[in-house]
Image (spheres, rainbow, N blue to C red):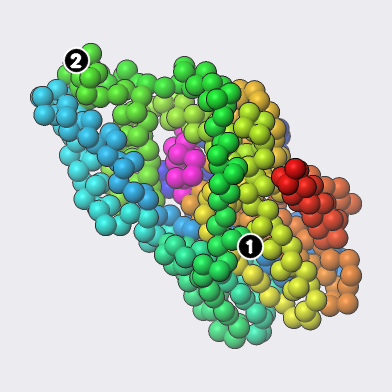
Amino acid sequence: MLRSGMRNKLAILVACCSLCVARGQVVLDIIRESPGFSSCNYDIYPDSVADNLTPAPQGKRPFYISHYGRHGSRYINRRSGYDIPYKMIVQANGVDELTTMGKRVLSEMNFILSDSEDRWGDLTAIGTNQHRQIARRMITRFPEVFADSACVSAISTVVPRCIMSMESALIELAQWNPKLHITMDASKRTQRYMNHQDPLLHRNDLTPEAQKAYDAYTASRVGNSRLMEMLFKNPDIVKELVDETFFSYYLMKMGLFQLNTHLNKETFITDLFTAEDLYRMWQIDNVLWYMRYGFCPLNGGDYPYSQRHLLRQMIADADSCLRLDRPGAQLRFGHDTVLLPLVCLLGINGYDLQTSNLDEIEARGWWSSSVFPMGSNVQFIFYRRNPNDKDVLFKVLLNEQEARLPIRTNCAPFYHWRDFRRHYLKKLDQYEKRRKR
């Protein structure tokens, strides 16, 4: 049921965004259809993607793709996320305070921990398949880019799940066209732009002002007394052992994370929670992602510039490839904490939103879950008539769906490359000048 919901989720999102009806009820309805949406960056990539791309302008043909993608579905990075609710329920069990359902949940948590042990952060089979499907759609949608002996250059961060995601995509491309000239690399040399985490910007991600606003926003959304009564004999007695807020939140996460593993149909933990429970958790997470990685004025509003090196590199790489008379693609494989601020920096689909009113974020359609599920990606598809064509056009795809940029164009959803590079290089230069003051 959950996986079938995933197949419908993207269509719901596209329809909602196109009608500009980004309201809380819309998100709640999405979560009812697909509970995984509530887990933000733990959500899984759609099983299928609508093939509704706008035809290229007359005479223009795709010849180059520039891509940055997040690794596919993985096991949770570290045990600590699971230990938070697990240690609490173990202590409650030690004083005989678990109900029958509580004991069942403890058994289920032991099962999940046993399955995850020594797999922390590893790519799962679901993650491998995600990147094979994305690569398959890429080559079938844009066969001209991968024709004959076209060049495909791929790089990854040095993290194994990213390297394996890259390999999965390249294997699929090679199977479709064995003549492709494929190179791949994973080196610390490219980490400066492939996985840059700016310590100066991180230092200000939650200022006292931002923390105060966050606490006020989350105050009415935390806790779950219904769950406590379901799992513990005397919820009031176990308060010293079980923090209701942390326990409920991390138990929800534990259940939802299994959608990324082979246990996705074998665990019932998510069923303990109502859609409203999941929605409140999503609201908390969504606001935190915005405050830490978006253009949030409460913390200086600059964090997306952490991906300035990546954007400059993507522009330089594209300029270089545009000089070639043969087609090709450059594929990059990394992380959610790069992809989300990159999308914000580009202002794709309005993700350059700036507001200090946290209640506005959801209403104005800033939904992190729509940006960075496992396997998420941004693709720039370039078009021209021939190698001598100076008016190169491109369009941007967010998770394989046409997206908009905050720059003028007379051929939407296509943009003139010269306008893009002029706009964003100026934007980056202005930030660098401010930073040096």
Q: Nearer the viewer, residue 384 or 301?
A: 301
Tell me which residue sits at (82%, 51%) in the image: 426
Give the amino acid at mark 2. Answer: Ile
Does label 2 or label 1 sit earlier along the sequence? 1
Question: x and y percent of residue 349 in the render?
Answer: 70, 43
> What segment carries the magenta color?
31-46
Question: x and y percent of residue 326 in the render?
Answer: 74, 81
Tell me which residue sits at (56%, 46%) in the image: 199
33 is within the stretch colored magenta: yes
Give the amino acid at mark 1. Answer: His
Query: Is residue 203 in view from this perspective?
Result: yes
312 is within the stretch colored magenta: no
User: Disc 2 marks which residue?
Assistant: 237
Quarter of the figure that contains the N terminus: top left
Tell me which residue sits at (56%, 36%) in the image: 205
Tell me which residue sits at (51%, 70%) in the image: 187
Quarter of the figure that contains the C terminus: top right
Q: Tell me: residue 121, above or below residue 302.
A: below
Q: Nearer the viewer, residue 325 or 59?
A: 325
Would residue 353 be found to the left or right of residue 220 on screen?
Answer: right
List the single residue furthest toward the top.
236
> Disc 2 or disc 1, which is closer to the eye?
2
Q: Tell me whether circle 2 and circle 1 mark residues in contact (CB < 8 Å).
A: no
User: Disc 1 marks which residue?
Assistant: 67
Q: Tell me: residue 206, above or below residue 230.
A: below
Query: Is residue 14 in view from this perspective?
Result: no
Quarter of the image for residue 356 reads top right
- Magenta region's main secondary structure? helix
Q: Nearer the viewer, residue 32 or 131?
A: 131
Question: x and y percent of residue 252 in the render?
Answer: 36, 34
